Amino acid sequence: GSPALMDSVATEFARRGYLTASIKYRLGFLGPTLTCPMDTIELLRAWYRATQDAKSAVRWFKQRHAQFGIDTNLVFAGGWSAGGYTLSGLAWMNDESEKPWQANQLNDTLINNFLYERPDLGSVHGISNINSHSSSIAGIFSFSSSFLFPEHQDENERTAILYFNNKSDQYEIPWEDCNADAWNYLCPNGLPKSCGIEAMLNQFEEFNIEHRYTLYETNICSHNLHEPCFPYFQEEISKITEFLNDISLCEIVGEDKLSTFQSSKTYLIHLEELESFLLPYTNWTFINTLGQNLTINSASFLDISVGFYYCFLPDSKQAPIKVYIY
């Protein structure tokens, strides 16, 4: 219910040099509590509003890329529990034809003897922060959730996926199949279909989607996989860091506009050793975090941050060399 719930993860990545924000999206649905009888249409409408707000947040930051130093091609999103379910809408629900019928204008509904209106919720893209930027993202990482509306994904959506779940999750979040009664700890039936990672593998492979996952089995902090109380919290942070860096491809952006390459080798270099490693190669340039080509010299090292992959370009046409700074 609060952006602060992801502060532990956000702080870890801010320390690594990423611009990191924990967003607030609209909460709530008609009905007093998460108990039965529940109006499951309202639960889908709440998910839809959260997805609209996530898309709006991505566009807001992309529009301010110069202010914050953002590479708009390398925006990632993570979420836990309800936030994790929102990620599938953020990544895959991009066509108006994919708008769930529950988000259209519906008849008024009577809940606890009070009549509520159900207006149309608008475009799948939302109505705020509409600008020249898309809400597309390079990758998602989710904790303690699964995938809603897997049919929305197609071969044109290239968002990479990193997934963490607990086989012993107290809320029985599906991981090996598609559960027609998702969130069945709330109500015995009538809730949206939700697919776990193993049920999605064939689809990811068919569409050639980069995907990785880790399934834990522990009763400690069983649903809160994003919290330091979870025994593998730092392991997760390391896996997310590797995931984000690995899908941040080196790209030649010189005058010949050669296509993107992925380096076949990565050098691990300590920041204090960087000058001695690079300065002998005076004909090299490097691409900084804004995608700018900079000449290698002592001053340019001020633009290099610990915890990033950087793409160093020899003057030949070979693939860039990827260097990780620690």
Image (cartoon, rainbow, N blue to C red):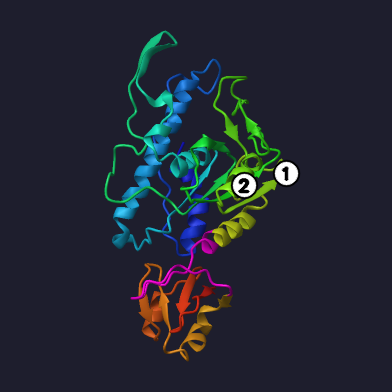
> Most prominent secondary structure in the magenta stretch?
loop
Q: Which of 157 and 8 is in front in this view?
A: 157
Measured as percent of width and height from the top left, residue 66 is found at 29, 62
Amino acid at circle 1: Glu
Residue ID for mark 1:
217
Label located before the other in sequence (1 or 2): 2
Mark number for residue 164?
Answer: 2
Label 2: how many Cα within 10 Å (few below 14, some 14–19, many 20+)? many
Mark number for residue 95?
Answer: none
Residue 7 vs 182, above or below: the answer is below
Q: Nearer the viewer, residue 279 or 197?
A: 197
Mark 2 lies on a secondary structure that is strand
Q: Give the range drawn in magenta.
A: 244-265
Question: What's the CA distance linking mark 1 and mark 2?
Answer: 11 Å
Mark 1 lies on a secondary structure that is loop
Magenta-drawn stretch contains 259:
yes
The image shows a total of numbered marks equal to 2
Measured as percent of width and height from the top left, residue 192 is found at 54, 27
Most extreme residue toward the top is: 113
The residue at the point 37 percent across, 34 percent down is 96
Amino acid at circle 2: Phe
Q: Nearer the viewer, residue 115 or 286?
A: 286
